[in-house]
Image (tube, rainbow, N blue to C red):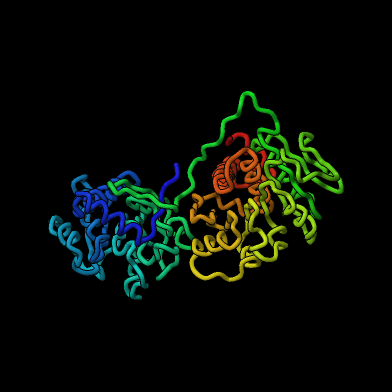
Amino acid sequence: MARPILTAKQMRVAEAAAIAGGTAETALMERAGAALAEAVRLYAGPRETLILCGPGNNGGDGYVAARSLTAAGYPVRVAALADPSAEAAKWARGLWDGPVDPFTAAAEAPIVVDCLFGTGLSRGLEQSVFQRLSLLVDKALVAVACDLPSGVASDSGALLSPIGSYDLTVTFGALKPAHRLMPAMQQMGRVVLADIGIAAAGDWFEIGKPDLPPLDPQGHKYSRGLVHCLAGEMSGAIALAAGAAAKSGAGYVRVSTSLPIPGLPSSIVQTGGADLQDERIGCILVGPGLGEIPQVLTLALTSRAPKVIDADGIGLIGEPERLHGHDTILTPHEGEFRKLFGDLPGSKPDRALEAARRSQSVIVYKGPETLVAAPDGRLAFAPPAPAWLASAGTGDVLAGMIAAMRARGLDGFDSACAAIWLHGCAAEAAGPLMIADDLVAAIPSIL
């Protein structure tokens, strides 16, 4: 199931709507603090716990968590950076009947819970604060962040201050962009989402398990989806992509190639030429292993069929406006993105959405964090994927999987999202020593 992702501003609006609907702000804080305490309790054993509270509502969540953990039998210490300034935080502080130490005097503890600052942070922490916080986090057996590690920009994932590595991050109501954006994402450990009664909805979300179209008992190979691949100078890449398309449920996969490609399954048809006006084509795939053959991309763009343009094909487009009027999915990594769109300003979500608007295409902006952007403003964030996907050929596999999903009848945006989710699961199944061929072989077990 897709989980909504809200910016800091959208989160404030959602909280205000919940309060206007009759839920007291203190009730939201009580739920958040209790959820934070439950996550700590489930993740770590009953060891001494240090909770670091800031002056805002994040600190208020910390005071509630301290009370809840104490009731559960945890030895709890609280250290505050400053007295509460928000009204709800003052309320929570008033219910905590234990001592509160100064942040600067906080002693190390096996469990450290960072409730200093959350989504509202707009500038870096003072040097003395982030140095002390980093020390406490690094010395802890288990470090937990409330909402976000202090020092993270919620909307961009940028590090406003140096931060340590956390084991667990507990957030409330909705995920925030930083939970799925580098460099912050790699510092957060496991991210868990607590429902505290805030209705969260919007055009940004984390990709969840796809709802794939069922097979038609009366269907045939063309109704299941014909993927037509255009080969170029390097046969290995298009072979991986075509194999991935076949394993991902396309009914028929064929490759236009001037020379036979060794190693392709016999079920994949190799042809010296093809009619790209064939109305049975569900998706054309061009780019993997293409090399410097611009006429192949030009040929693909003469067709009315949906297209996935990957790798070398992206570098041959020239101007994004060339794709207007086409049903196109682009799959650039950072270098290919910059070559086509230049140095766009803003965060990675900003750049992805602007690229989708300029090209009127679905953009699969690949990297340690992969985003899918649509021209209509939808933006999907990939869930964390295994680090071992960073190897040769895995992008070709993803392109083939997207083409198969598109040929099977999903729209461009949903095709990209489905393939990304399945791609990550296949990598987990293939294991850390996999190569791209192993990734292709793992696809059927995931489906």
Residue 43: give x, y in percent of width and height. 35, 46
Residue reaching furthest bottom? 127
In the rendered structure, the answer to whether residue 47 lies left or right of residue 332 reads left
In the rendered structure, the answer to whether residue 62 lies left or right of residue 217 reads left
Q: Is residue 51 visible?
A: yes
Q: Is residue 428 visible?
A: no
In front of the other: 445 or 109 = 445
Residue reaching furthest front? 325
Tell me where residue 293 sits by quadrant.
Answer: bottom right
Q: Is residue 259 above or below residue 214?
A: below
Residue 252: give x, y in percent of width and height. 72, 36
* Quadrant position of the N terminus in the picture: top left
The residue lying at 35 percent from left, 58 percent from top is 10
Residue reaching furthest top? 217
Q: Is residue 54 above or below residue 95?
A: below
Residue 171: give x, y in percent of width and height. 34, 53
The residue lying at 36 percent from left, 51 percent from top is 174
Q: Is residue 8 above or below residue 247?
A: below
In the rendered structure, the answer to whether residue 15 lies left or right of residue 369 reads left
The residue lying at 49 percent from left, 64 percent from top is 350
Residue 422: give x, y in percent of width and height. 57, 42
